[in-house]
Image (tube, rainbow, N blue to C red):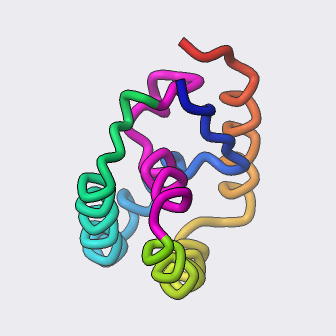
Amino acid sequence: MKPVTTCNTCTRHLVDLCYKRSLAFRLFRTPLVAGMKIMARYHRINLKDYPVRTERCRDCIRLTKNALKLKSPAFVRLNDIINPYFNRYRDLIVSADEKARAKSLAAEFMEYESD
């Protein structure tokens, strides 16, 4: 099995908060996620090959993103361009306390053993 993705922040937690608060965020993120899924399919990335710490993590886009970083130089370049804008936009929607909670959730999840 491939290595478990290591998370410092629970992306899914922050995205859930953003989705509840901003339709524009969903409209911004949805094509990015679709692009990652298309690139993952092109690079024959099978997420079932990647163990996860919790079932909540199973369909987190972090798995796809990290796998693409290993297999696609084009993705790495695109991510370097888009990710700072994405993070700034997300940070306008969530508070510092919520980001701290996402970090503590990731730490909790990283303590679990893989299935």
Picture residue at 44% right of the left edge, 77% below the top: 74
Q: Magenta stretch?
A: 50-72
42 lies above or below 6: below
Q: Position of residue 49 (x, y in %)?
A: 42, 29
Q: Is residue 34 left or right of residue 99?
A: left
Q: Is residue 100 left or right of residue 64?
A: right
27 lies above or below 59: below
Prevalent SS, magenta region:
helix
Q: Quadrant of residue 95 in the image?
A: bottom right
Q: Position of residue 69 (x, y in %)?
A: 54, 61
Q: How many marks?
A: 0
Picture residue at 45% right of the left edge, 72% below the top: 75
Q: Quadrant of residue 106 in the image?
A: top right
Q: Position of residue 109 (x, y in %)?
A: 66, 28
Q: Nearer the viewer, residue 114 or 74?
A: 74
Query: Is residue 37 found inside the magenta-colored segment of the image?
Result: no
Q: Position of residue 8 (x, y in %)?
A: 73, 49
Picture residue at 26% right of the left edge, 74% below the top: 27
